[in-house]
Amino acid sequence: MELKDAFFKLLEGRHSVRDYLDKAVSFDDIGLILEAGRLSPSSGNLQPYFFILIKDKDKKEKIAEASLEQWWMAKAAWHIVLVADIDKCKKFYGLRGESLYSIQNVAMAAENMLLAAQALGLGACFVAAFDENEISELLGIPEGFRPQGIITIGYERTSERKPKVNLDKLVYYDSFGNRLEDVDLVLKNINVVGRTAKASKNLYEKVVDKIKEKVKKAKEKSN
């Protein structure tokens, strides 16, 4: 399998897992997941975040309680709490760094971790609904740092895979709200036929050709 095919298969396979087997996950696997987080992009390559590993059963239960009583979380083998270094982001990028970049940095690290878990045959879920003050107090997170997400890791028992919206509902051209119906049809078909290497290549090529054709006609019309 080519790298690009393996990558899209990985993306399609990733889903939020909220039901876990009572089965240990090795620290080696957790280390690889953390490494994936370390390799994520960040504003100015500051890497303004920290990852807190939680394996203790009692602490996982307290985290689940602080996460709006999502008790399923306690069944995961590990929790990874992602903490943003707010002061560092603010120091380099001011208000935008404090209010936006700090969130984006953690989100990108989290997605890398979720994909790594999928690649390792593990289930994972990103949790953002929790009482920040309770989590900070429980884990001793000081002022100037903010817990922004919790990733649960374990072996999947069951899960519900929710469908994703088709590309033709998500893509605009040149400006917000602008659609090209013929290209939208091709984008929609990409979701229908699945991401086999040949089908994806042909459909994406059609998209490019259609867009080039539209641009060419628009230029001719303006002249």
Image (tube, rainbow, N blue to C red):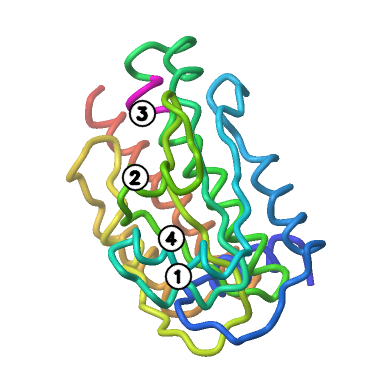
Q: Which residue is mark 2?
A: 132
Q: Which of the two discs, 1 and 4, sits closer to the camera?
A: 4
Q: Earlier in the sequence, mark 1 or mark 2?
A: 2
Q: Is 100 inside the magenta-drawn segment?
A: yes
* Dot 3 alpha-carbon crowd within 10 angstroms: few under 14, some 14 to 19, many 20 or more: some
Q: Earlier in the sequence, mark 1 or mark 4?
A: 4
Query: Which image quarter holds the C terminus?
Result: top left
Asked if residue 29 lies left or right of residue 118, the reply is right
Name the amino acid, label 4: Ile
Q: Is 68 inside the magenta-drawn segment?
A: no
Residue 8 screen position, x and y as percent: 61, 65
Residue 86 screen position, x and y as percent: 44, 24
The mark found on residue 190 in the picture is: 1
Mark 2 element type: helix
Q: Nearer the viewer, residue 96 or 60?
A: 60
Q: Earlier in the sequence, mark 2 or mark 3?
A: 3
Distance of label 3 from label 1 (alpha carbons): 33 Å
* Residue at horizontal 39 percent and vertical 65 percent from the top: 186
Q: Earlier in the sequence, mark 3 or mark 1?
A: 3
Residue 44: name its quadrant: top right
Mark 1 element type: helix
Mark 3 element type: helix
Looking at the image, how many numbered discs can be counted on the residues? 4
Name the amino acid, label 1: Ile
Q: Which residues are magenta?
A: 97-101
Q: Which residue is mark 4?
A: 63
* Residue at horizontal 45 percent and vertical 69 percent from the top: 61
Pointer 3 and pointer 1: residues touching (CB < 8 Å)?
no
